[in-house]
Image: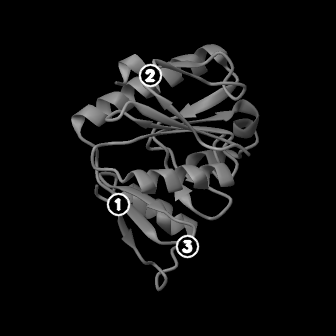
Amino acid sequence: MVNPLEINCNSLQLTDEQFFQLCQDNRDLRFERNSNGDMVIMSPTGGETSNRNLKIIQQLGIWTDQDKTGIAFDSSGGFKLPNGADRSPDASWIPLEKWNNLTPQQRQKFLPLCPDFVIELRSPTDSLKTLQNKMKEYIENGTRLGWLINPKTKQVEVYRQGKKVEILDNSTTLSGENVLPSFVLDLELIW
């Protein structure tokens, strides 16, 4: 598996504004920053992974539009986590209250919060350990429910606040539980 390229930025110390501008100036690349300020550069995904991610986003987006209790984001949405990391989950959701508490200026940049719900979709080149660490980081920073979906093995790792990771094999659906009540992700469209 290939790990994303990680660049030590100790000597640069980019401000949040500079990092945001770097991302805007290089839209063909996907940047994140870890909590140490090191830049993480991820390559674009292949067609199969992109299509799977679209199917996830479609389902989450339709549910969000019908439910009207929150806002959903695709993989291009950035979040400034409480630990200082800048992350872009493959899909995410926040309650409407959190969105409404943001200023118009905050809504234009990486959102200064951790999503309540995240999904990471493993592509053939992703390191499982790297994605697992990312999921743990989301939970440690306030995510209430997270799914790490691995199409190759048809496994889903379910992350919840204060609970051990649950591994589901060959599931056909996933429930949004009490975080996204009535949301059900159809995994048969993803596998």
Regarding mark 2 in the picture, which secondary structure is present there? helix
Label 1 CA crowd tier, 10 Å (few <14, some 14–19, many 20+): some
Residue 16 image-quadrant placement: bottom right
Label 2 CA crowd tier, 10 Å (few <14, some 14–19, many 20+): some
Give the residue type at disc 2.
Gln
159 vs 50, left or right, is: right
Circles 3 and 2: CB atoms closer than 8 Å: no
Query: Where does label 3 land, which residue?
Result: 36
Which quadrant of the figure contains the N terminus? bottom left
The answer to whether residue 40 shows anywhere in this view is: yes
Query: Where does label 2 land, which residue?
Result: 58
Residue 5 image-quadrant placement: bottom left
Q: Is 131 rendered above or below residue 175? A: below
Front: mark 1 or 2:
1
Residue 121 image-quadrant placement: top left
Q: Which residue appears at 68% of the width and 59% of the height? A: 82
Circles 3 and 1: CB atoms closer than 8 Å: no
The answer to whether residue 105 shows anywhere in this view is: no
- Mark 2 or mark 3, which is nearer the start of the sequence? 3
The location of residue 88, given as percent across then percent down, is: 49, 49
CA gap between label 3 and label 2 equals: 33 Å
Q: Is 153 rendered above or below residue 189? A: below
Query: Where does label 1 land, which residue?
Result: 4
CA gap between label 3 and label 1 equals: 16 Å
Give the residue type at disc 1.
Pro
Q: Which residue appears at 47% of the width and 72% of the height? A: 38
The location of residue 24, given as percent across then percent down, is: 41, 56
- Mark 1 or mark 3, which is nearer the start of the sequence? 1
